[in-house]
Image (cartoon, rainbow, N blue to C red):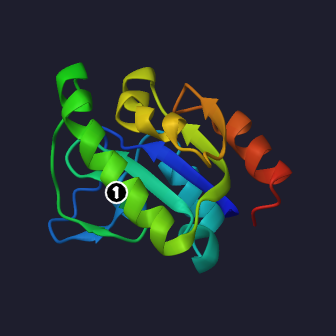
């Protein structure tokens, strides 16, 4: 197992830039602005940040995203579950299973990640259920000694 991973939910508020821009810049709600401010110049930390998008499933912080508007319903969350499970398997096969994961997600956003809990070598998972709770998120990142 390696490192740590943060997965945050996408936000309804997005940058209005018409061209594709990195996910960390596309999302302007939730904890995305604080993540961008804290990790703007830290490429290695940005590489350990994912967003759970109602449109795309898991995206890396620097994946370019075009504008979109899709809300995560329970039905969509269930549709994304096998997609996200596959994305996690590929991600972990390429980089190793993280030691710890921080999920900063509303409850419906946990549904696509449910298969994570069935992994034989699953990471220690911490969950912040309010995607606007930057103080709690920052406390975990500080404990992990992220920049």
User: Seen from this angle, which residue lies furthest front?
Assistant: 120
Direction from residue 118 to residue 144 in the image, left or right? right
Q: Residues within 10 Å of mark 1 (few under 14, many from 20)?
A: some
Q: Nearer the viewer, residue 58 or 104?
A: 58
The N terminus is located in which quarter? bottom right
Q: Secondary structure at mark 1?
A: helix
Number of marks in the rendered image: 1
Direction from residue 111 to residue 79 in the image, left or right? left
Quadrant assignment, res 65: bottom left
Q: Which residue is mark 1?
A: 87
Q: Residue at x 62, y 31 (%)?
A: 127
Image position, residue 48 (x, y; %): 57, 64
Q: Residue at x 74, y 51 (%)?
A: 141
Q: Is residue 12 above or below residue 59?
A: above
Q: Nearer the viewer, residue 94 or 41?
A: 94
Image position, residue 134 (x, y; %): 64, 39
Q: Could you tell me if residue 72 is visible in this image?
A: no
Q: Could you tell me if residue 31 is visible in this image?
A: yes
Q: Nearer the viewer, residue 68 or 102?
A: 102
Q: Is residue 34 above or below residue 66?
A: above
Image position, residue 89 (x, y; %): 41, 57
The C terminus is located in which quarter? bottom right
Q: Residue at x 80, y 54 (%)?
A: 144
Q: Nearer the viewer, residue 64 or 75?
A: 75
Image position, residue 79 (x, y; %): 18, 34
Direction from residue 77 to residue 33 in the image, left or right? right
Q: Residue at x 72, y 37 (%)?
A: 135
């Amino acid at each position: 197992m390696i490192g740590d991973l943060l997965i945050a939910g996408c936000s309804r508020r997005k940058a209005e830039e018409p061209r594709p821009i990195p996910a960390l810049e596309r999302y302007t709600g939730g904890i995305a602005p604080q993540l961008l401010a804290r990790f703007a110049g830290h490429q290695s930390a940005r590489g350990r940040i994912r967003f759970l998008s109602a449109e795309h499933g898991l995206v890396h912080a620097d994946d370019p995203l075009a504008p979109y508007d899709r809300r995560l319903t329970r039905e969509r969350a269930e549709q994304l579950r096998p997609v996200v499970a596959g994305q996690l398997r590929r991600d972990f096969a390429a980089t190793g299973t993280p030691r710890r994961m921080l999920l900063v997600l509303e409850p419906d956003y946990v549904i696509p990640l449910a298969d994570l809990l069935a992994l034989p070598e699953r990471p220690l998972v911490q969950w912040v259920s309010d995607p606007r709770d930057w103080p709690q998120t920052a406390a975990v990142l500080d404990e992990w000694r992220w920049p």
